Image (spheres, coloured by chain):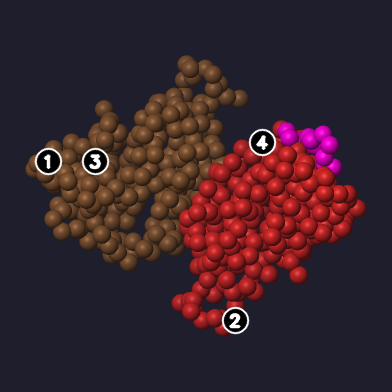
Chain colours: A brown, B red
Amino acid sequence: MTDQNNPTSPSGGRGASLDVCLTPALIPLYNVQDYIVVVIDIFRATSSICYGIENGAEAIIPVSEVEECAAYREKGLNYLIAAERDGKVVDGFDFGNSPFSYTAEKVSGKTVVLTTTNGTHALHLSRSAKKIVIGSFLNLTALCNWLKTQQENILLVCAGWKNNFNLEDTLFAGAVIEQLKDTGFILDDPAIAANDLFRIGKQDIAQYLSKTSHGERLKKLGIEKDIAFCLQVDLTTAIPVLDGEKLVKLV
Amino acid sequence: MTDQNNPTSPSGGRGASLDVCLTPALIPLYNVQDYIVVVIDIFRATSSICYGIENGAEAIIPVSEVEECAAYREKGLNYLIAAERDGKVVDGFDFGNSPFSYTAEKVSGKTVVLTTTNGTHALHLSRSAKKIVIGSFLNLTALCNWLKTQQENILLVCAGWKNNFNLEDTLFAGAVIEQLKDTGFILDDPAIAANDLFRIGKQDIAQYLSKTSHGERLKKLGIEKDIAFCLQVDLTTAIPVLDGEKLVKLV
């Protein structure tokens, strides 16, 4: 039994929906305005965003195009601009998409403009949500503890790869469900699947993901260290939240 | 190592792609013309189609709308028309979507026009494929044995539920992959996920699916017997193939 109609329900998700949108292409199937949305792009956008906000970045602005990012250069020295092509920092940019660029000494007090195709796409399509927050393994438990207090439907949006399903984002969605599922949420089929996949992979997520296409692709880019970094659990506690066009620390 | 460029490769999929399209909404992400497509709609369209073709139906024509189906009534007595709403046969139709309606005594020598929203949608979007065949647990091994001989890329298209992911179609895709994966196919991320989900559920697929939303929905329609029927493995050997607008027996 659930008490979906009881607004004074004491525990986190009792009767609310905990759904997983496996790719941005499927966002139109959800009434996004009825949800808190968590955007997930594990390799590497949302991991870098969590790390940057934890390390004192004033804000992070995700954009789709390198040109759009470059335009921020003219706004002043307080902006850092980040863009990569084929695993290399684009000429004239401050750094690429590696989370190792988002240390306190580099980003504290700054606004970082980050070029990320899949993540920006997912954010844009989720705009009508009640709230949009950013998730990664880095802030997993802090995020889940906050979600438990929200008494709202939750939609975990996997940024995926070129609008299609990927395993790393789905596994992270499954990790969130693992922490929330005993608090009374109703899971949709993708949520059940994501959680089961997480339970298969959780003993060694890096090993599990090494067989995937994206893992292969990232290895070829020579960013194995980034991958290992992005799979660290609970390194941070900040929850980035969308405020207008900027991601800032949720307070 | 794969020998993708060797057309004389002796084993089924060596170097070819074995991909899973988790919902019809994602079909546009694939170059469908490069694949043999298997359309999957376990509860109940593709199970009923496999059973009907096995039992001697001359052809099965899947359509989206009840009205479209009804129009076939005027084409003569050789046509049987099948449509359901809310689990009940629509007035004036010969039968509904239960596989139990597709027995030899009812369908042998007849053409059945079947109303199925999700399955028809998946078929329509796959039209440009090299070939389109129909899969269900009923014809699993016969289908896989044929696929092994084809030396082509294979795309398993899950009809899903209202354009979104469902577990039963994905599990069946995983069952196909289980039989094909050691013959040298390259799997995409959805294929890896589908196979892992099948491996979780395979000991008792009915039990595994009972926790899903669609399972609940179907139970409410009072068609538990249909569900059990659709989960029988290798009851049939016929492979339905699309020929124009009709599904006929592959010979």
Observer-nearest of B106 and A149: B106
Q: Kindly identify the amino acid type of the residue bearing the numbered disc 1.
A: Lys
Eyeballing the image, is A33 above or below B190? above
Q: Amino acid at mark 2?
A: Pro
Residue A86 seen: yes
Asked if badges 4 and 3 are on one and the same chain, I answer no
Q: Is mark 1 in CB contact (under 8 Å) with mark 3? A: no
x and y, in percent, of residue B17 in the image: 52, 67
Chain that bears disc 4: B
Cβ atoms under marks 2 and 1 closer than 8 Å = no
Q: Indicate whether residue A103 is drawn in magenta.
A: no
Callouts 1 and 3 in the same chain: yes
| Dot 2: element | loop
Which marked residue is nearer to the observer: mark 4 or mark 3? Answer: 3
Query: Label 4 amino acid?
Result: Glu
Chain letter behind tag 3: A
Q: Which tag is nearer the camera, tag 1 or tag 3?
A: 1
- Kindly identify which chain the residue marked by label 1 belongs to: A
What separation in Å lies between label 1 and label 3 (alpha carbons)? 13 Å
Q: Badge 4 local density, few (<14 within 10 Å), some, or many (20+)?
A: few
Image x and y of residue B136, in percent = 70, 55
Q: Label 2, on which residue?
A: B10
- Under mark 3, the amino acid is Ile
Q: State which region is magenta.
A: B85-95
Instruction: Characterize the local packing of mark 2: few (<14), some (14-19) or many (20 or more) Cα atoms within 10 angstroms.
Output: few
Q: Position of residue A87 (x, y in %)?
A: 26, 61
Asked if badges 2 and 1 are on one and the same chain, I answer: no
Mark 4 = which residue? B216
